[in-house]
Image: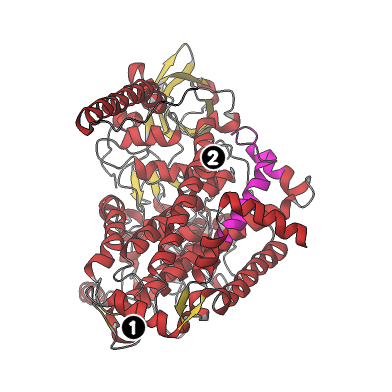
């Protein structure tokens, strides 16, 4: 023991780091910050370290080459001992990291920690959030499978919409004219060298500023932040009723950090690694690419925005959001910190959370995408053809063969792109059905060129049977009246 | 080494002398940085500038005309003309070939004009459908419904001695050379 102490003293005589480290660890913090609400920052750092360690382990096997990345992932999953577990830790770690960084940001915002004098800490935090999302996107590319390949295509399509420099940006991003070897290599460089290097630097600055400026005190309603007096008040508070960070507050951080590590490990163990899905071979087109969960909201948004709004939205809104986040502490640097006195802040957070949550939820079952296999996979339910005429049955066949099911459901199976047709006859008259099928409209393609008159007649005859037994089909009252006036018996329709 | 007596320098001359060398040092490093910056910038921007001289596009064969029956739309694949050794399968590209009649063709990019997902052809309903955000196109490539703002991208083609070749080499995106080669189609009903 004495030898160890001696060696320690010998080293510190030369390094002289023990004193500043002890000072940092024992710096007084307001007693009420030793709270379970204050553990998310250190948790984010913990997950970041997990990502660094598992990332380095993966790099021992992974090959960043478009020709071999996919098979090296297969080797990690199936050949290398516990390779699947390290991949799963890294994948689940990225999900946890995005989630914890967002929770940390919400907590900091609701507790008013972005206000004077911690503006720069917040701004660097915004950069850290952007870099975390950058790691998430580039990480998805590292899993070089079909989702990664077509995800890059989506990224390139968005980038190409930038006026004037768009095509140049695409070539810079892809490292050439197409998604290929150079693309994976440059995303590897970003994911492994550039962004992590920046992250480490900015995390150090972020933590250094927390140490220098002191941790945000628990906000009390009515305790107003003023530039002139805040720092004196804060130092008075920590001097009078402060407690050393170690061990008074740190034990909660430590418990939560261990809990998060175990949570990632449990998820990794039970749910396993993510993918890889099919090979990144662009000639295999039977694929429906989807982003990882942190970008699902964007996937939904891109389907639901009106086409004409899409490009302006994509190019204008993200810079505005980032600018707004950066300017936030300068626009509201003083005043109330407590969320109990900041109703607009609370409503804003709730609105954003509900919006992102709704989009993410929608993107999980993509009601806007045609079900590519519904027409051949889901038969028309028996009850819809029970007791029908030959013509109506022929119509059901046309309905199936012409892939109407890809976009329209009946009997709760089929696509959700268009409306469900179980009771379409109640909504549309015979003439309206014919017009809709032939001319399309309201986001439905026109089938006039693709259906013979006989097919159309049969299809519409079938569609007219689609109504609940208790409801009669829609009919054109005026037309009936006119036809009855001129001909006592209704004439057979063409 | 002999120790020289420290002469307290008359501040003005020492400052200007040291200051001069300091300035010279900064300028020298600035020059070195500039010398280094030229190759770095040229290296980084090579993927942009390489394509500028003669373009990435060149003519690639898709196969015999007889492989494509009249009035039908078939999937064809070609190898991208620019290949690097590490590209693997990514240089193989698919496209939809529609033989209208005789030597009259339409060759569509596989990439949806919305965000580049692979569109699939459904001969029964005569539509191209996209699995990502629900774009749909008619058999002639014009927009039918969904988020795309234009029809499918078309490769320029030519038919020579029974062989169909297309001009390709770039990922078709709304801003790429392919997109402007064929221009926009009016939506057809």
What percent of the width, then of the height, locates residue A177?
A: 43, 29
Give whichever of A80, A277 is nearer the camera.
A80
Q: Quadrant of residue A45?
A: bottom right
Q: CA distance from mark 2 to mark 1?
A: 43 Å
Question: Quarter holding the C terminus of chain A?
Answer: bottom left
The question of residue B27 being in magenta is answered with: no
Image quadrant assignment for residue A428: bottom left
What is the secondary structure assignment of the residue under circle 2? Answer: helix
Position of A313 compared to A262: left or right? left
The subunit letter for the residue under badge 1 reads A
Q: Which mark is residue A338?
A: 1
* Above or below, B163 relative to A206: above
Residue, disc 2: A188
Numbered range of the magenta stretch: A47-74
Q: Residue furthest front?
A: B5
User: Are labels 2 and 1 on one chain?
Assistant: yes
- Vertical position of residue B107 compared to residue B66: above or below: below
Residue A14 appears at what percent x and percent y?
Answer: 59, 49
Label 1 crowd (10 A; few <14 / some 14-19 / many >=20): many
Q: Is residue A50 magenta?
A: yes
Q: Is residue A203 above or below residue B156?
A: below
A337 or A225: nearer the viewer: A225
Q: Main SS type for the magenta part?
A: helix
């Amino acid at each position: 023991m004495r030898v160890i102490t001696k060696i320690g003293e010998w080293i510190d005589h030369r390094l002289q780091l023990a004193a500043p480290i002890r000072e940092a660890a024992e710096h007084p913090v307001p007693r009420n910050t030793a709270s379970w609400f204050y553990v998310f920052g250190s948790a984010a750092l913990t997950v970041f370290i997990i990502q660094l360690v598992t990332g380095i382990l993966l790099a021992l096997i992974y090959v960043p080459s478009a020709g071999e990345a996919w098979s090296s992932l297969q080797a990690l999953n199936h050949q290398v001992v516990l390779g699947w577990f390290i991949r799963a830790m890294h994948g689940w770690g990225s999900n946890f990291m995005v989630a914890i960084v967002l929770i940390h940001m919400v907590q900091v915002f609701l507790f008013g920690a972005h206000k004077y004098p911690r503006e720069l800490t917040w701004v660097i935090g915004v950069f850290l959030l952007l870099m975390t999302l950058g790691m998430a996107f580039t990480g998805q590319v590292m899993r070089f499978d079909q989702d990664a390949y077509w995800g890059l295509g989506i990224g390139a399509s968005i980038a190409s919409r930038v006026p004037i420099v768009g095509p140049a940006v695409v070539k810079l991003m892809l490292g050439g004219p197409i998604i290929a070897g150079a693309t994976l290599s440059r995303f590897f460089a970003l994911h492994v060298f550039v962004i992590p290097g920046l992250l480490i630097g900015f995390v150090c600055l972020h933590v250094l500023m927390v140490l220098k400026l002191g941790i945000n005190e628990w906000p009390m309603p009515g305790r107003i932040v003023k530039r002139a007096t805040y720092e004196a008040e804060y130092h008075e508070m920590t001097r009078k009723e402060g407690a050393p960070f170690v061990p008074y507050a740190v034990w909660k951080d430590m418990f939560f950090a261990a809990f998060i590590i175990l949570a990632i490990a449990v998820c990794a163990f039970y749910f396993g690694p993510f993918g890889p899905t099919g090979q990144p071979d662009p000639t295999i087109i039977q694929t429906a690419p989807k982003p990882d969960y942190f970008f699902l909201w964007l996937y939904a948004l891109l389907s639901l925005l009106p086409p004409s709004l899409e490009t302006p939205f994509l190019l204008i809104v993200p810079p505005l959001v980032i600018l707004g986040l950066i300017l936030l502490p300068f626009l509201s640097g003083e005043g109330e910190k407590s969320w109990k006195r900041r109703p607009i802040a609370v409503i804003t957070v709730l609105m954003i959370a509900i919006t992102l949550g709704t989009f993410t939820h929608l993107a999980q079952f993509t009601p806007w995408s045609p079900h590519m296999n519904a027409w051949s996979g889901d038969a028309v339910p028996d009850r819809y053809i029970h007791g029908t005429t030959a013509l109506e049955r022929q119509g059901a066949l046309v309905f199936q063969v012409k892939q109407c099911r890809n976009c329209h459901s009946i009997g709760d199976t089929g696509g959700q792109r268009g409306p469900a047709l179980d009771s379409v006859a109640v909504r549309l008259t015979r003439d309206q059905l014919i017009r809709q099928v032939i001319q399309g409209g309201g986001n439905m393609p026109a089938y006039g060129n693709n259906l013979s008159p006989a097919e159309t007649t049969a299809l519409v005859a079938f569609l007219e049977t689609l109504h609940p037994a208790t409801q009669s089909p829609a009919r054109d009252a005026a037309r009936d009246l006119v036809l009855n006036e001129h001909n006592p018996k209704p004439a057979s329709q063409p | 080494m002999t120790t020289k007596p420290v002469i307290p320098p008359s501040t003005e001359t020492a400052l200007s002398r040291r200051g001069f060398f300091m300035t010279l040092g900064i300028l020298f490093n600035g020059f070195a940085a500039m010398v280094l910056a030229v190759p770095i910038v040229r290296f980084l921007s090579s993927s942009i500038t390489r394509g500028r001289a003669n373009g990435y596009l060149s003519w690639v064969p898709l196969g015999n005309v007889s492989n494509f029956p009249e009035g039908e739309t078939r999937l064809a694949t070609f190898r991208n003309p620019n290949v690097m050794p590490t590209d693997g399968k990514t240089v193989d590209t698919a496209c939809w070939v529609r033989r209208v009649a005789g030597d009259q063709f339409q060759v569509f990019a596989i990439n949806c004009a919305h965000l580049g997902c692979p569109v699939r052809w459904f001969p029964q309903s005569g539509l191209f459908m996209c699995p990502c955000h629900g774009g749909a196109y008619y058999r002639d490539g014009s927009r039918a419904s969904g988020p795309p703002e234009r029809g499918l991208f078309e490769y320029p083609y030519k038919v020579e001695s029974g062989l169909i070749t297309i001009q390709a080499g770039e990922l078709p995106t709304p801003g790429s050379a392919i997109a402007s080669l064929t221009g926009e189609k009016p939506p057809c009903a």
